[in-house]
Image (cartoon, helix red, strand yellow):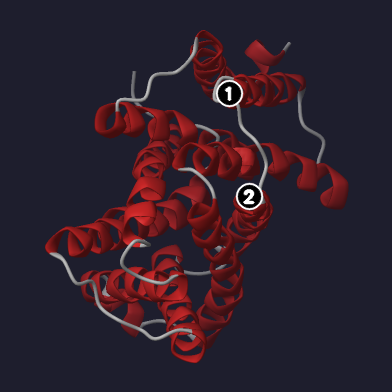
Amino acid sequence: MALTVQRKADLALIMVVMFWGTSNLLTKVGLGDLNEFNLIALRFVIAFILTSVIFRKRLMAVDFGTVKRAAVLSLILFCVFIFATFGVRHTTVSNAGFLTCLSGIIVPMINFAFFRIKQDRLTVISIAMAIVGVWLLIAGTSITFNLGDILCILCSVAFAVHILVTERLTRQVDSVALGVIQLGFVGVYATTFSFVLETPTLPVSFSNWMVVLGLSVFSTAIAFVTQTVAQKYTTATHTGIIFTFEPLFSVIVAYIFLGEVLSFRGYVGAILMLASLMLIELKSQFGKVVSR
């Protein structure tokens, strides 16, 4: 059976989440050598240079409207990474992975509260399953709240806003150019803050250079351009639910590199989250027949 455009977009977003599932671990390692704004600046400047070279022809055709939209998106994204990076500094990789995924729950809530967009029954069931799954994962790791946890929750709120704004702005302009310029703006903001509030440096070891490059190429350049393009062909609700799967990939990375193992409740939560994704994808394929 041929894949629909929306299904391809959803699969692309799953790839993005896989990259982001490793980013908290890489960020934690990178912060051992660099300050927060310094790390964000390197991450986004390198990502912008890479993507601007790849998509240089599309950037040459950019109009002022695209630049304005990118400026709006980049301010929101910068807030996302301020909360996320400082959050990872003050909490564990596992906590950060779990709490930053709350955007999947917040997106439909914002849609309903501010735009009066009602969610169908199957979507509500999928969201409920994802909520229970996240809770079981959290309970399975005995999470305790601290400053880092609060910052990660604020990251989720900011990212939910970013998802919704991206969905609206990408339908009016070249989504690739919008995504690339967005990276450049965040790099400029972070570099400015780093020079004002910190003493900018470069990584001192080969391993930390690999961390920065991993964050720049996979978790930033590929991920955010893919997200920007894919969201043009799917919905904010689908995007939000798919993004709740970031903790699963964080768990896999933690198991491979740190030897961490989930509790029984954690595995039940993981299964529920996977089931919620299957349910929302089933709705996408069969539409009204399934939702009856």
- Which residue is tagged 1? 280
Image check: 165 left or right of 32?
Answer: right
Q: Disc 2 on helix, strand or loop?
A: helix
Residue lying at the far left of the rendered structure: 206
Instruction: Examine the rendering and report whether any part of residue 6 can be seen.
Output: no
Q: Residue at x 35, y 32 (%)?
A: 254
Image check: 80 left or right of 229?
Answer: right
Asked if residue 223 is positioned above or below residue 281 in the image, the reply reads below
Asked if residue 113 is positioned above or below residue 201 in the image, the reply reads above
Q: Quadrant of residue 19?
A: top left
**Reading the chain from its start, which is encountered first: label 2 or label 1?**
2
Residue 37, image x, y percentages: 46, 74
Q: Residue at x 22, y 69 (%)?
A: 54
Instruction: Examine the rendering and report whether any part of residue 166 can be seen.
Output: yes
Residue 66, image x, y percentages: 51, 78
Q: Which mark is residue 156?
A: 2
Q: Residue at x 67, y 18 (%)?
A: 288
Local crowd at mark 1 within 10 Å, few (<14), some, or many (≥20)? Answer: many
Q: Quadrant of residue 131?
A: top right
Q: Residue at x 50, y 13 (%)?
A: 271
Q: Quadrant of the C terminus?
A: top right
Q: Disc 1 on helix, strand or loop?
A: helix
Local crowd at mark 2 within 10 Å, few (<14), some, or many (≥20)? Answer: many
Q: Amino acid at mark 2?
A: Ser
Q: Quadrant of the N terminus?
A: top left
Between 127 and 140, the one nearer to me in the picture: 140
Residue 282, image x, y percentages: 54, 17
Q: Amino acid at mark 1?
A: Ile
**Count of marks, rendered view:** 2
Between the C-alphas of marks 2 and 1, the distance is: 21 Å
